[in-house]
């Protein structure tokens, strides 16, 4: 499902609908930066054929990055990376059993030759993955680069405007 008018440059995928609570933060950040993206549930375990097709066709469909969020065993980012040369940005979704440490370790411990850029557990990781995707796109997409620079400037200005914690 494409959420923007333009052809998507970023895919946001997740292992289950429940992961949307975390992954929506990536979508919100991409929206704010004007990055066209798509969102899809693609399970590494329940729909592996769909996963393989998605990954294999990602580059030819114009995707330049895939943000893949998963919890628990968290095989989704690694399996996608195994099937595409499009950069995969892994977001560990917090799990009940181990607070997301299981997800983090599953995503970050990839074998040599199948890279997955791995971000923090949860909402911050999803937001940062979107910012990283925008940074990847910025050299060839000047409007995205300008939006990213403006975001960073606003962050700096906000900290400077509120530098006294007593106020």
Image: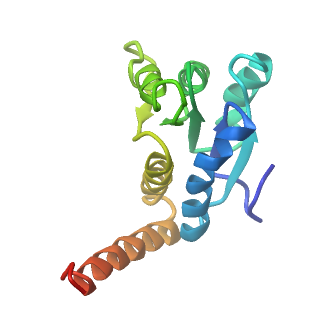
Q: In the shown orientation, is residue 101 left or right of residue 144?
A: left
Can you give x and y, in whole percent of width and height, for residue 67 in the image?
Answer: 56, 41
User: Based on the displayed image, in which of its 4 quarters is residue 61 positioned?
Assistant: top right
User: Based on the displayed image, in which of its 4 quarters is residue 82 positioned?
Assistant: top right
Which colour style is shown?
rainbow
**Can you say whether 111 is above or below 146 in the image?**
above
Q: Residue at x 47, y 72 (%)?
A: 147
Q: Residue at x 64, y 36 (%)?
A: 59
Can you give x and y, in whole percent of width and height, for residue 37 in the image?
Answer: 67, 54
Q: In the shown orientation, is residue 94 left or right of residue 48?
A: left
**Can you say whether 149 is above or below 98 in the image?**
below
Q: Quick one: quadrant of the C terminus?
A: bottom left
Q: Residue at x 53, y 22 (%)?
A: 78
Can you give x and y, in whole percent of width and height, for residue 162 in the image?
Answer: 26, 83
Q: Residue at x 70, y 39 (%)?
A: 18
Can you give x and y, in whole percent of width and height, for residue 24 in the image?
Answer: 63, 53
Q: In the shown orientation, is residue 167 left or right of residue 59?
A: left
**Can you say whether 74 is above or below 68 in the image?**
above
Q: Nearer the viewer, residue 61 or 95?
A: 95
User: Based on the displayed image, in which of its 4 quarters is residue 45 positioned?
Assistant: top right
Q: Nearer the viewer, residue 59 or 112?
A: 112
């Amino acid at each position: 499902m494409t959420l923007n008018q333009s052809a998507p440059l970023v895919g946001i995928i997740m292992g289950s609908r429940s992961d949307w609570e975390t992954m929506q933060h990536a979508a919100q950040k991409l929206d704010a930066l004007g990055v066209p993206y798509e969102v899809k549930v693609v399970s590494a375990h329940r729909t592996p054929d769909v996963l393989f097709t998605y990954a294999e066709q990602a580059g030819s469909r114009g995707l330049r990055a895939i943000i893949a969020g998963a919890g628990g065993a968290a095989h989704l980012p690694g399996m996608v990376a195994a099937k595409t040369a499009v950069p995969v940005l892994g977001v560990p979704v917090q799990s009940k059993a181990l607070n997301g440490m299981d997800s983090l370790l599953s995503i970050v411990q990839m074998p040599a030759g199948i890279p997955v850029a791995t971000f923090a557990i949860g909402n911050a990781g999803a937001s940062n993955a979107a910012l990283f995707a925008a940074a990847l796109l910025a050299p060839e997409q000047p409007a995205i680069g300008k939006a990213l620079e403006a975001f960073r400037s606003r962050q700096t200005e906000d900290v400077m405007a509120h530098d006294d914690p007593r106020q």
